[in-house]
Image: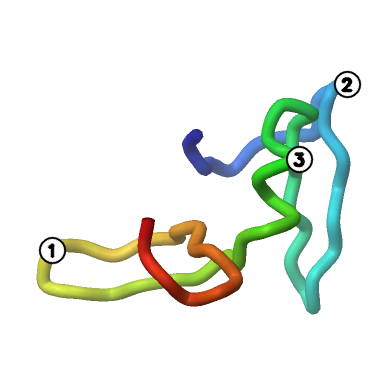
Amino acid sequence: MGMALDAPQENEEIFKVDSFEILVNDDAKPYASSNVLDYINTVEGEGFILQPESGQCC
């Protein structure tokens, strides 16, 4: 599952969080509801990641 800037497609739902609009396709919806979108900036790199709500790593 990847993340990118994109225009909405037919099989996607738009979720608004603060000033962000997040597009989630039908296949990813079951996973999206139990995860938190986070942004990291480390020496290995930076970017958005999905983390479990519990905060534990898989």
Q: Residue at x 75, y 55 (%)?
A: 33
Q: What residue type is labelled 2?
A: Glu
Judging from the image, what secondary structure is the residue with disc 2 in? loop
User: How much space separates mark 2 and mark 1, taking CA atoms?
Assistant: 35 Å
Q: How crowded is mark 1: few (under 14 residues within 10 Å), some or many (20 or more)?
A: few
Q: Give the residue pinned by disc 1.
A: 44
- Which callout, 3 or 1, points to the residue nearer the camera? 3
- Tag of residue 10: 2
User: How much space separates mark 3 and mark 1, taking CA atoms?
Assistant: 28 Å
Q: How crowded is mark 2: few (under 14 residues within 10 Å), some or many (20 or more)?
A: few
Q: Would residue 8 be found to the left or right of residue 39 on screen? A: right
Rendering coords of residue 12 (x, y %): 82, 32
Q: How many labels does the image show?
A: 3
Question: Reading the chain from its start, which is encountered first: label 2 or label 3?
Answer: 2
Determine whether label 3 and label 1 are within 8 Å by CB. no
Rendering coords of residue 13 (x, y %): 87, 40
- Which residue is farthest top? 10
Question: Reading the chain from its start, which is encountered first: label 2 or label 1?
Answer: 2
Q: Residues within 10 Å of mark 3 (few under 14, many from 20)?
A: few
Rendering coords of residue 39 (x, y %): 44, 71
User: How much space separates mark 2 and mark 3, taking CA atoms?
Assistant: 14 Å
- The one of 47 and 54 positioned closer to us in this rendering: 54
Q: Which amino acid does label 1 sit on?
A: Glu
Q: Give the residue pinned by disc 3.
A: 29
Determine whether label 2 and label 1 are within 8 Å by CB. no
The quadrant holding residue 57 is bottom left
Judging from the image, what secondary structure is the residue with disc 3 in? helix
- Which callout, 2 or 3, points to the residue nearer the camera? 3
Q: Residue at x 84, y 23 (%)?
A: 11
If the image is split into quadrants, where does the C terminus sit? bottom left
Q: Would residue 46 be found to the left or right of residue 48 on screen? A: left
Judging from the image, what secondary structure is the residue with disc 1 in? loop
